Image (cartoon, grey):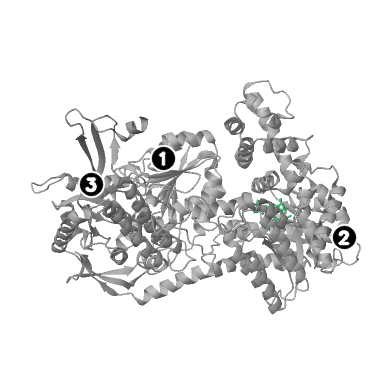
Amino acid sequence: MDREHLDAAIVARGRQFFEAIGDEAPSVFKKDWWTGKVMAACMENEQFKVQLFRFIDVLPYLTTAESLGRHMQEYFGREQAVPAALRWGVKGVGLGGRLAVKVLGAVIRKNLHMMARTFIAGETVPETVRRLAALRGQGFGFTLDLLGEATVSEREADAYAGGYLAMLDGLEQAQPDWPAIGGAGGDLDWGHAPRVNVSVKPSALYSQADPAEFDGSAAGILERLRPIYRKVVGLGGYLCIDMEMRRLKNVTLEVFRRLRSEPEFRAYPHLGLAVQVYLRETDGDLERLLAWARTEGLPITVRLVKGAYWDYETVIAAQKGLPVPVYTVKAETDAAFERSAEVILRNQDICHLACASHNVRSVSAVLETARALDVPEDRYEFQVLYGMAEPFRKALLKTVGRVRLYCPFGEMLPGMAYLMRRLLENTSNESFLRQEFVEGVEASRLLESPAAALARTAGACGDGPATTAGAAAGPAGEEAGGLGPFGNHPFPDWTLAPQRAAYRGALEEVRRHLGRTYPLFIGGKDVTTGEVADSVNPARPDEVIGRVCQAGTDEVASAVAAAREALPAWRDTPPRERAAYLVRAAGAARRRMMELAAWQTLEAGKQWDEAYLDVGEAIDFLDYYARQMVRLGEPTPMGCVAGEVNEHFYQPKGVAAVIAPWNFPLAISCGMCAAAIVAGNCVVYKPSGQTPVIGHTLSQLFREAGLPAGVFNCTPGRGAVIGDFVVEHPAVSLIAFTGSMEVGLRILEKAGRTPPAQAAVKKVIAEMGGKNAIVIDDDADLDEAVPAVIHSAFGYQGQKCSACSRAIVVAPLYERFVERLVEAARSVRIGPAEDPANHMGPVIDASAQKKILEYVALAEREGTVVYRSDVPAGGYYVPLTVVTGITPAHRLAQEEVFGPVLAVMKAKDFGEALAWANATRFALTGGVFSRSPDHLQRCRREFRVGNLYLNRGCTGALVGRQPFGGFRMSGVGTKAGGPDYLLHFMDPRVVTENTMRRGFVPMAEGEAAAV
Ligand SMILES: Cc1cc2nc3c(=O)[nH]c(=O)nc-3n(C[C@H](O)[C@H](O)[C@H](O)COP(=O)(O)OP(=O)(O)OC[C@H]3O[C@@H](n4cnc5c(N)ncnc54)[C@H](O)[C@@H]3O)c2cc1C
């Protein structure tokens, strides 16, 4: 193929399209209508666009005149301030007051409904079928897509699948009346394409789909997809599997391969899937897919799209510290589209191409490449979205004939998310439609080849290599040779088969090392003791994870002595050098990432994600505190007075006892120890009795970092034997504790007594419990709120101090929330954490199990248990429990359970919900789901907790981003992973020198500069 010649043909073809389009604008841009005016206002004013899109998002929930009026005011200001575009068509404005708001609200709702109708083919099956018949009459084929809420439960997935089957019934009845399009005769459009064509979103078919559980997710989706496809096949129809977020991309590819090759369907050719070219991985995916089709001898169809989730993918990657998976320069995506289209066209014998784009250049490129390659016309077609680019679709129909419209149908409430995506697409700066129909960019520029566009913009945008976005630019660890800016450890990416295999491999490897005996570590040496305690797998208590030597008071006394001995030299080690040890320990942890996480899965019952993120957090603490200490290690000059020099600096407190919990067995242990050590203290560390083997891994990390003997000592042992002893030891000047309120208060009390031999007032850093609430406002987005509450309440079995144990729901949304929550809870699978199919595992031990079961019994007495799951046999399992009818007076609203028991409370209004949220002794975390700007603002002030999360779950604080810790009975107000944390481990000092000698004052630097 002569590229130059091809490009000229593409440009010529594009010009023909532009001529055919003429001055006609798509309906969304027509300025003589409400939609066009509003869209124009959006493109002129970014702030208005944001507010409008948020308003559209919440609109379906605003069912009363009061809430509609309130939200309009909150989003756009007082009635008179509502932008003219929105007020257009409103008669009687100027009435003032509530009547005007009511009128305005009603008109805006009606107009937005009409706007949505631009993109949605119908709300019911009969209405949609009528619309499809009309479109077919104009010569357009269709593919039908059922709009749906995000499916948060298996029941919702059933309903979604049922919706498809009902729709197919409607199409079955209508189909015989539809003559085939294209005049080729027979039943097939254009002589080759089924008349019935549907598109399905795989994520909606299985609520528990999770990339970590690859096989099970594919199987779960297929279970509901199979009956739909069977029906499609029965109708002689076609089914396309849509592509959604990247997290399910590989699972979706697998679903396609399995369905296509199943014996029942192998002989039926009409199955396709969408492939998104904006993903950098797509070249490889496509190559493998085509190779697979060839090997299997199975013809397939690919709908080639650029990808509809660009903003989401870039933002999520940045938040998780992962490489951005999509191209970041628009021309790269355009180039990928042309490249992939050519690959498919060259494989036309095995792969039919559906070119899905509104971009005249992209479509022209496909058309001309197909012609240059002599691809038969029945091997490719063109698709556009219903309601978008109507003038182009008409021109396309006239030129190539084979045009299919992607027609969503269904209720408006679920349709709003779809509407938002389309509006974003239409109004984004990069959108071809905007550039063509609004900005009036010249045809020559619009038809420019992506390669030329890339070359032109290379200087401005760079060449778009795979980047890790934003602040989470990855830690500059020891490998980077120094302390660069801090970045959180990246999240795991279970979409990658090697990562999943590595985790399974790590679990197997760790299993090979079970049952070993672990010594104490004192003064740089291993120390064994006669008493040994077994640590077991909570999912299989007969499986011994390790046998751990137990420290008695003698061993703790020697550890304190070793720490004292090491203190002077360690205290005087320059802060930068101390920080370097932490960075080395972080490097060691990074190298053992999967193995360290696997220990947690087996010893603590942590799911893959939870375990991996715990190790990631430990690494973050090491990296973060190292950098904080370098900052704090520099003395700060104070004041600016001639003849006097003041220096403010810190020194460590001395010997620190670190008493750690089992629920974040590496992260919290590591955080407290690392902070103490880097600040110059020497540590006696007592890991939790439930997770001492993980405690030992921390010892290994510090050993590998090469800490001098005595700086870190590890003394596992029973709290009853050594707890008070270490707290009361006169040589201990600092106690860092995380755990229950009872133990924390006891430590505070013991540490407050000062025996004569004690040289310093003890400092206690205590992180204690929580009774955390998530408030669900009456306008909350339940698609988001329900999964967030499920995750916050039941993630790691609810055994996090940050866990949500109260959901306080504002009355109008209460029934709907509870219904969806209970179904979502019912969908959670429970079993050993090593199987990623299980999203809930065992609790830590028999005594936790007993205590939680008592609370479950209390729930039966205090409220109505609306869901109580079954539990697997063996293991320390407790039922996932949801109880309603709880008020602040109940114990379940006040006491920390530390297990998967969620109290749901019904508040009459937002004010009451907020008051209830604050009505406990604790103040650790809290959450609010609301789309009212005023309510969100009010929460910032009045929801008094250490960590408040707006419109997200209340767990998962990240080092350096959400410094973590509460106050009141939740702790003493320190913030782990924040800029102030290290200050608690040090004493500040100030040295003042009088620099005047006999009336002579040395010239200060500042003054010298001024002379
Ligand atoms: C019939 C049909 C079916 C579809 N099905 C799906 C589907 O299953 N899954 C899906 O994800 N999408 C689907 N889409 C949407 C599609 O992915 C595009 O979002 C949409 O068509 C816009 O692309 P365009 O070529 O029409 O317009 P253009 O304006 O040329 O391209 C816009 C696209 O470019 C990409 N982009 C934007 N900014 C940048 C940037 N800075 N750097 C790199 N790339 C950028 C994005 O993908 C964006 O959507 C479908 C579209 C159609 C027409």
The answer to whether residue 58 is left or right of residue 875 is right
What residue is shown at x 61% (from left), y 36% (from top)? 47
The answer to whether residue 377 is left or right of residue 96 is right
The reply to whether dot 1 and dot 2 touch (C-beta < 8 Å) is no
x and y percentages locating residue 233 in the rendered image: 75, 68
In the rendered view of the protein, which quadrant contains the C terminus?
top left
Can residue 110 be seen here? The reply is no
Mark 1, Cα crowd under 10 Å, few <14 / some 14-19 / many 20+, is many
Q: Which residue is mark 2?
A: 181
Mark 2 near ligand 1 (CB under 8 Å)? no
Given the image, on which type of amino acid does mark 3 rest? Gln
What residue is shown at x 48% (from left), y 66% (from top)? 836
Mark 3 near ligand 1 (CB under 8 Å)? no
Given the image, on which type of amino acid does mark 1 rest? Ala
Frontmost of labels 1 and 2 is 2
Quadrant in the picture for residue 583: bottom left
The answer to whether residue 543 is left or right of residue 398 is left
Can residue 620 be seen here? The reply is yes
Mark 2, Cα crowd under 10 Å, few <14 / some 14-19 / many 20+, is many
* Quarter holding ligand 1: bottom right
Q: Nearer the viewer, residue 248 or 66?
A: 248
x and y percentages locating residue 726 in the rendered image: 17, 55
x and y percentages locating residue 673 in the rendered image: 28, 56
Q: Nearer the viewer, residue 184 or 989?
A: 989
Find residue 651 and name its label: 3
Find residue 917 and name its label: 1
Number of numbered callouts drawn: 3
